[in-house]
Amino acid sequence: MAETDQIPAEYAAADHQTLTQRIALRKRELGNRLVILGHHYQRDEVFQFADFTGDSLKLSRQAAEQADAEFIVFCGVHFMAESAEILSAPHQRVCLPNLAAGCAMADMAEYADVAAALDELRAMTDAPIVPVAYVNSTAAIKALTGRAGGACCTSSNVRKVFDWALRPAPDGGAGGRKVFAVPDQHLARNTAAAMGYDEADLATYDPHQPGGGLSAEDVERATFVLWQGHCYVHQLFTRDDVERARQDEPEATIMVHPECPRAVVDAADRAGSTEQIRAAVGEAAPGSRWVIGTESNMVERLAREHPDQSIRVLSAGRATCVQMARIDLPHLLWTLDAIAAGEPIHVIRVADDVADDARTALQRMIAI
Ligand code: SF4
């Protein structure tokens, strides 16, 4: 992740009203030259300025379609801005308002470690291994995946991508006998379980141990090798939370994100990506009750959007992505002012060769 720049005092010290007024003015002034993207987990005060909202991939694709937009300001985290940069047109610049807004899960999978792991695994078995990189990964990991014959996945399409990875090549698949899933072990474990595989079909690669802590027999036996990464926000939710919610609100539907641990997904009524959660609530009848296991900003916003339903987060306290929260009004205004001054800051750049290979992995996913 890139280094943090020190925000000038005039932005850090400005009050809420001044910041919101100046951001609104800058937006008007920049007009079609600017598109602001807001991820569902973003705080409201920033989210209100988004021209488009959604999950990371949907936002990147929408941004790329705004041909007039010279500047794409991504109010998300670093890997999302990288994806937008990879999918954007050459004349577009992508800015992340605060370069310290990384993703703890993406940072658990360093390029050198994953490349070494793939080599080790391929040395341990003759069975073809297809890497699948969750979009919550760095551009370098996506590029490695593209070069190694694999594809990216999102939490919405991961099952389709796993099916493709294991399907014989003559049937349109990648011809793999094993999937190497990076970086989220929970998304992969929950998806493999939904496809009918059990724990005996999985092996977890621990990057802190030689050979990932796996023997050749472990690798030979497994259909899925899971990188030992996780999202700390979704790991906050526990099976106890689900059982307590069931006791307190027996009529509520408990729906959780597949980045939650397997025990939580098993105990819940449904699992789905951010877009699938939003769709489920959007289609529900008035009076429906929901207890939702994902980031609090999104759940609280859903509750405000659907006042005719009862919607609350699964945990007792808030479940917040602190990296996402590093995008705040002062950083947004600072970024817009710099664009207006003709000296854009926090521009995300992905080297051409990395972008080309990462785009291959993303395009394979889109084609699946
Ligand atoms: S919620 Fe988790 S996976 Fe999503 S950006 Fe934050 S740390 Fe990364």
Image: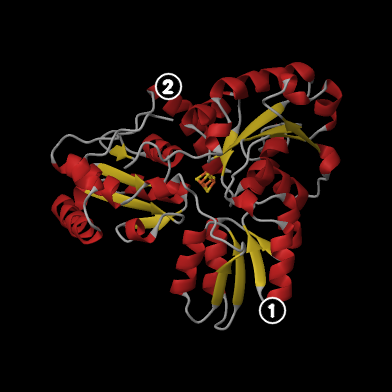
Image coordinates of residue 230 in percent, x first then y, are 62, 41
Q: Nearer the viewer, residue 36 or 143?
A: 36
Residue 12 visible in image: yes
Is residue 361 left or right of 225 when viewed as pictured?
left
Instruction: Sort mark 1 into few (<14), some (14-19) or many (20+) by Cα contacts within 10 Å.
Output: few
Image coordinates of residue 165 in percent, x first then y, are 68, 36
Residue 69 visible in image: no
Image coordinates of residue 308 in percent, x first then y, are 50, 82
Q: Which corner quadrant of the image does residue 220 belong to?
A: top right
Label 1 element class? loop
Is residue 197 left or right of 156 when viewed as pictured?
right
Vertical placement of residue 317 versus 64, above or below: below
Q: Amino acid at mark 2?
A: Asp
Q: Name the residue beneath numbered marker 2.
A: 353
Q: Is mark 1 within 8 Å of ligand 1?
A: no
Vertical placement of residue 354 versus 10, above or below: above
Q: Is mark 2 within 8 Å of ligand 1?
A: no
Label 2 element class? helix
| Spatial CA span between label 1 and label 2 | 52 Å
Vertical placement of residue 162 versus 127, above or below: below
The quarter of the image holding the N terminus is: top left
User: Which residue corresponds to the image point at 54% horizontal and 66% vertical from the top-left?
Assistant: 279
Q: How is the image coloured?
A: secondary structure
Mark closest to the chain's N terminus, 1 or 2: 1
Q: Nearer the viewer, residue 17 or 158?
A: 17
User: Which residue corresponds to the image point at 16% horizontal and 50% vertical from the top-left?
Assistant: 30
User: Which residue corresponds to the image point at 25% horizontal and 42% vertical from the top-left?
Assistant: 71
Q: Which disc is residue 251 wearing? A: 1
Q: Which disc is residue 144 wearing? A: none
Instruction: Sort mark 2 into few (<14), some (14-19) or many (20+) by Cα contacts within 10 Å.
Output: few
Image coordinates of residue 315 in percent, x first then y, are 61, 61
